[in-house]
Image: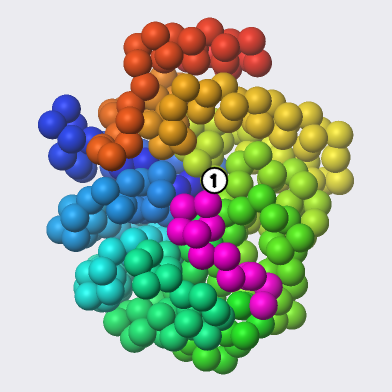
Amino acid sequence: MAPTLTAFKDDLSPNLDVIQDYAKFLADSKIMGVLVNGTSGEGMSMNVEERKRVTEEWVKAVKKTNQHLMVQIGGAPLPDVLELAKHAESVGVDSLLCLPDLYNKPNTSLDLIRYLKTVGTAAPNTPLLYYHIPSYTHVHIHMGQFLNDSVGKIPTFHGIKFTSTALDEGVAAVKANGGKYAVFLGADQLMAGAYTLGFDSAIATTLNMFPQLGITILEAVKQSKLDKAKETQDILTEVCAIVTKNGPWVPTMKVAMDLYTPIKVGKAREPLINITAEHINEMKVALKTVGINN
């Protein structure tokens, strides 16, 4: 799955016109699902109405491409999260992803279970997943323990997005509840290692602009071609380092999207800082050294 980037116009209002082509581009690139309004999508930099409009346009788009549509509804005051969950279910999304409360942070599995159960009541017919990204949320609840503790306690709960480099914890999550939960890897630089350890799915930003690299890694591991998987992972890891050398993850990845795909997503919103023209040229030159050309 690709965590889609939200396209913004020059005035930084959401550009909904690109979404139909964006969905087709990803589908043609063999990306089977999309996550909307997540970290890469700057969901937490948009208001409720903007997030709803982006979701509605993606619902229309995936009806043509037959992709799974997951929408991130968290990162807002709880009343807004509940409103976003209810709206997402009403327009027919396939699943929901939710951050923890970012102010009243959960400290234990029970805290997180209670929060997600509340969120789930607003969309009782839609699968709900938890978004574990401790580098942003500073919520460090162990996901293996949480998933085992959650069994039978959240009616709509189906798994997590695991955006962390702690692969031992990730493997514990994959094995939790007898392996019945969905666990999506969210770390582009760890795909090969994670797949060999039992992960089978990813929601990774580079699947937007360099999908062939991520797909090659997964297929190579499935075919036990571990040398091929490692070789491709090395390239992808270097690509990530080059792209993000001079700025934050999202603004630099948006530049890469504009440079290397037909989909133009524009700049990132405040409080993120966009990179300079000089740094963009540096990125282009450096990526050529690893065989990436626009």
Q: Residue at x 41, y 49 (%)?
A: 39
Q: Which residues are magenta?
A: 134-145
Residue 60 visible in image: no
Q: Is residue 45 above or below residue 80?
A: above
Q: Amino acid at mark 1?
A: Ala
Q: How is the image coloured?
A: rainbow
Q: Is residue 40 above or below residue 184?
A: above
Residue 148 visible in image: yes
Q: Residue at x 65, y 25 (%)?
A: 238
Q: Mark 1: which secondary structure? A: loop
Q: Position of residue 88 (x, y in %)?
A: 28, 68
Q: Residue at x 33, y 26 (%)?
A: 274
Q: Residue at x 41, y 15 (%)?
A: 280
Q: Is residue 290 above or below residue 38?
A: above
- Residue 291, image quadrant: top right
Which residue in the protein does label 1 denote?
204
- Residue 228, image quadrant: top right
Q: Position of residue 150 (x, y in %)?
A: 57, 84
Q: Position of residue 1 (x, y in %)?
A: 52, 51
Query: 47 left or right of 183?
Result: left
**Labels in figure, total:** 1
Is residue 62 one of those drawn in magenta?
no
| Mark 1 residue crowding within 10 angstroms, few (<14) / some (14–19) / many (20+) | many
Q: Position of residue 168 (x, y in %)?
A: 76, 60
95 vs 37, nearest the viewer? 37
- Residue 14, image quadrant: top left
Q: Is residue 166 above or below residue 41?
A: below
Is residue 144 one of those drawn in magenta?
yes
